[in-house]
Amino acid sequence: MQLYTFDPAPNPRRLSLFLAYKGIELPTTQVDLMKGEQLGESYRAINPAGTVPALVLDDGTVMAEVIGICDYLEALYPEKPLFGDGPLARAQVLAWDHHLFVGVFMAIAETLRNGNPAFEDRALPGPFKVTQIPALCERGRQRLAQTWPALDKTLAGRDFLVGSGVTLADIDLLVAIEFAGWIKESVPESCTHLHGWLARTRETLGIQG
Ligand SMILES: N[C@@H](CCC(=O)N[C@@H](CS)C(=O)NCC(=O)O)C(=O)O
């Protein structure tokens, strides 16, 4: 297996926290997004979508979605499970992953990519020209503002998002909160359950606050 990734970026970080917690080490190549290497011919021959991470299996199969990569690795390395305990928990982890990706990561990404000149004509990841829509910056912030109190309410009386232990759902939310910092947004102080969960999740994953 060979992993193509870029450590500072949020989707790669979801995967690297998953790997670190489970103690999985993979041969890794960094694809520098700051230098645009993801759009170069050699990387697009591996992943035509021009996104990281991508995991290339020994038979040449390419996996380019974090959720698919994690699901595959969970099956290969079942120790220290991160998809919960049993079918219902697994379904809930998948549901959270989808919800957080669509609802939170995308809200942050639309704010980041539609206002910053560095993303001119690249309002979505990938090789195609996508014109910025500045109104989406404000809409992204509005979506986020609604998200924090809802998550806070969910986490009242719970240690983690699914079941009694950390899962990929918690990793996704932790990385989403870090990613919000890229657009200078943060969890409001009033969201005490969310802050308590954040401290607990960081400690469980061995991350400095
Ligand atoms: N659906 C993909 C999303 C991957 C993605 O969007 N990665 C970003 C980095 S966080 C990327 O490669 N961006 C490249 C670009 O902006 O050109 C997944 O879950 O892995």
Image: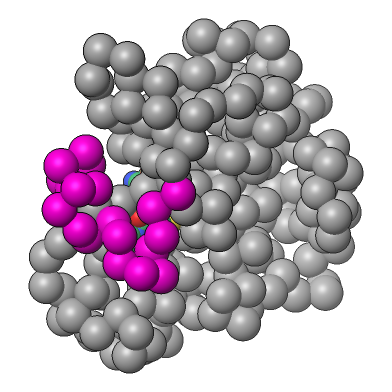
Res. 54 image quadrant: top left
Q: Position of residue 137 (x, y in %)?
A: 39, 84
The image shows residue 72, relative to residue 99, as above or below, that is above
Question: Is residue 94 visible to the viewer in this orientation of the structure?
Answer: no
Scheme of colours in the image: one colour
Which residue is more in the foreground, 69 or 82? 69
- Left or right? Give the position of 88 relative to 155: left
Question: Is residue 167 visible to the viewer in this orientation of the structure?
Answer: yes
Quadrant, the N terminus? top left
Q: Residue at x 67, y 17 (%)?
A: 81
Determine the quadrant in which ligand 1 lies. Answer: bottom left
- Left or right? Give the position of 150 relative to 203: left
The image shows residue 22, relative to residue 153, as above or below, that is above
Identify the magenta region: 30-48
Q: Position of residue 104 (x, y in %)?
A: 49, 60
Which residue is more in the foreground, 104 or 12? 12
Q: Position of residue 23 (x, y in %)?
A: 70, 23
Q: Position of residue 79 (x, y in %)?
A: 69, 10
Question: Is residue 75 magenta-colored?
Answer: no
Q: Residue at x 56, y 44 (%)?
A: 14
Label count reads 0
Which residue is more in the foreground, 154 or 159? 159
Q: Residue at x 23, y 20 (%)?
A: 60
Quadrant, the C terminus? bottom right
Res. 192 image quadrant: bottom right
- Left or right? Give the position of 187 relative to 64: right
Q: Residue at x 79, y 39 (%)?
A: 205
